[in-house]
Image (cartoon, rainbow, N blue to C red):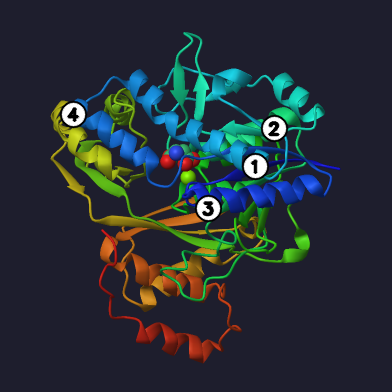
Amino acid sequence: MALIVQKFGGTSVGTLERIGRAAERVAATARAGHRVVVVVSAMAGETNRLLKLAHDIAEVPDLAEVDVLIATGEQASAAMMAMQLIARGHPARSFLGHQIAIHTNSSYGRAWIESIDREPVLAALDRGEIVIVAGFQGIDAANRTTTLGRGGSDTTAVALAAALGADYCDIFTDVDGVYTSDPNVVPDARRTPHLTHEEMLEMASLGAKVLAERSVEYAMRYNVSVRVLHAFQDGEGTLVDGREDEMEQRTVTAVTCQRDQAKIAFRGVPDRPGIAASIFAPLSEAGVVVDMIVQNVSEHGLTDLTFTVPRVDLKRLLPAIEDVARGVQARQVDHDPTIAKVSVIGVGMRTHAGVAARMFQALSAVGVNMQMISTSEIKISCVIEDKFSELAVRVLHDAFELGKKKAPSPRGKASAAKKKTAPRKRARA
Ligand code: ASP
Ligand code: MG
């Protein structure tokens, strides 16, 4: 008998009928003798609907009250899930964030979970009830409702699994696992049966949408085994845990693409101590997450400093950036919102050489220029022109033989790559 947290996302609870089918899955787990704690998202589209109402009232609505409003989506789902279970003869009850003391900090709209009181949950389980928890919401020290950031029900589920010492945290969603790349872009992308927390964390932070990034951080910190499963199809899904399986022998596990970035370049800045600090301090004060910083070798005491920021932040940052540029006597400052970051990820990179060379060759074979490169132990990212992003993802997926098909011969590979040189029209902005 195991204790399992089962989280259902917005599409999986998008209609009453779907909540019913999800309830059936939960009931089946309970009938198999397991103790089940269910975490639910708001019905698909509900959070967006509520956010729009808030923004119809004010351009910048009160942040704390926005959280009170958008937390209602999960409250409704939790009650309906409990009712669907009760209607099927299973004792069940719902809990809101404050009822199990999901304590968070006070960053309304993106709060961090600090602690959870597992006693009420355990007591209900001991009474033989199926416990339903409203995802995405918590309460702060000032006794106000908070929410955990978009996709935050994943975080509730993983944090709850950690607090309860659950055997698994199942994330039920509308795909049957985590894929080697986005199947909408790469038709022969495959489901990966297993990923390490580290790989999943890189993937989530580099554009894979299947799990909220913070939930993976919690899973890694508390060593929670997460299974990503299709809500309404049977299958093994993808297991994400801390185990590094040496038998798997893979170098690259996934190719991701992030298309919501922008590039800022300070050109001809004096190369002296303190310059980088004076460029980045105002950005950090504005709460902007800066990524991929590249400083060139200086010439005649001047250097170029280039970095990426989330594209949504670019416009509001520009005045501050112009200010800083004057302050540090930059010759020029450029910005470019039409970039994308493509990355290859895999724990095998620690022990296998040649990944970078293979990546760069694959991109150059189709004439894609790399504007910036950054690496960590288990990933390599390149900034390229946004219009080439889908092409780049496809050729990298091929180059690392991640597809369903058998690995093509080297000659076949070259010609396959050549055929793809013509950039396809962008499907999404
Ligand atoms: N309902 C929230 C959102 O749409 C949280 C979640 O779905 O996980 O972001
Ligand atoms: Mg979601």
Place of residue 294 in the rendered image (x, y in percent of width and height, measured from the top left): 35, 45
Circle 4 — which element?
Answer: helix
Place of residue 309 in the rendered image (x, y in percent of width and height, measured from the top left): 31, 41
Quickly name the residue at label 2: 162
Identity, as a three-letter code, of the amino acid under mark 2 = Ala
Nearer-the-camera pick, 102 or 232: 232
Q: Is residue 304 visible?
A: no
Determine whether the beta carbon of the residue marked 3 sits less than 8 angstroms from the nearest atom of ligand 2.
no
Instruction: Give the mark nearer the N terminus: 4 vs 2.
Output: 2
Circle 2 — which element?
Answer: helix
Q: CA distance from mark 3 to mark 4?
A: 50 Å
Which numbered mark, 1 or 3, is in the foreground of this view? 1
Q: CA distance from mark 4 to mark 2?
A: 41 Å
Quickly name the residue at label 1: 87
Q: Residue at x 82, y 50 (%)?
A: 32
Q: CA distance from mark 2 to mark 1?
A: 30 Å
Quickly name the residue at label 3: 17
Place of residue 340 in the rendered image (x, y in percent of width and height, measured from the top left): 33, 57
Residue 320 disc label: 4
